[in-house]
Amino acid sequence: MTDPVTRMLADDAASRALGIEVRDVTAGAATATMTIRADMVNGHGITHGAFVFAVADTAFACACNSHGPLTVAAAVDITFVAPSRAGDVLEARAVERTRFGRSGIYDVTVRRGDDIIAEFRGTSRTIGRDRA
């Protein structure tokens, strides 16, 4: 894992509370996993979309912060493709598509095994210098 991401995750109470684990980070890419708990399921018996979004967003954050400067989301779009349920392990893989000026575009695929659960596209914005 790259140092800027390690430092960012040390202060990421939200991802820790959700049980999100960052498995791999390289320049412009990251993989995060999360096991869906019973308290993450909505009234339809499927994973609440906010939790699918959360694991994708953590992978996105790690990928776009892997370059060093403090970077945040400027815009995101998510398409839910298939449901997941309690006990499922979701894996979100973020990949950088392009960086231009202070912005970047990243695609994140959320899977349960071979099944695609969601596709997420995020636009990042660098707002600061390298993390100290």
Image (cartoon, helix red, strand yellow):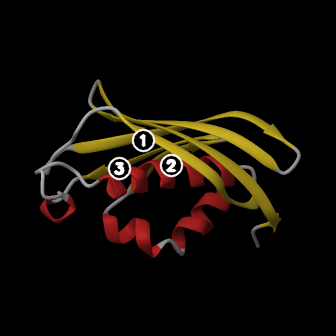
Taking depth in this image into account, of 98 and 29 the one nearest to the observer is: 98
Give the amino acid type for the residue marked by disc 3 in the picture: Val
The residue under label 1 is 92
Of callouts 3 and 1, the N-terminal one: 3
Residue 41 drawn at (x, y percent): 17, 57
Give the numbered dot on residue 52. 3
Q: Residue at the location (67% across, 55% down)? A: 65
Q: Residue 110 carries which label?
A: none
Mark 2 neighbour density, 10 Å: few (under 14) some (14–19) many (20 or more):
many
Q: Is residue 77 above or below residue 57?
A: above
Count how many numbered circles sit on residues in the image.
3
Instruction: Find out whether the residues at labels 2 and 1 contact each other: C-beta distance under 8 Å.
Output: yes
Nearer to me, 1 or 57: 57
Separation of marks 3 and 1 at Cα, in angstroms: 9 Å
- Rounded to the nearest angstrom, the CA distance separating label 3 from label 2 is 11 Å
User: 16 left or right of 71?
Assistant: left
Q: Is residue 110 above or below residue 23?
A: above
Query: Is any part of residue 66 visible from this angle?
Result: no
Q: Looking at the image, tell me whether mark 2 or mark 1 is earlier in sequence order.
A: 2
Asked whether the residues under the numbered discs 3 and 1 touch, taking CB atoms below 8 Å apart as contact, a structural biologist would say no
In the rendered image, which quarter is residue 6 located in?
A: bottom right
User: Label 2's element?
Assistant: helix
Q: Amino acid type of disc 1?
A: Ala
Residue 12 x, y percent position in the rendering: 50, 71
Observer-side mark, 3 or 1, equals 3
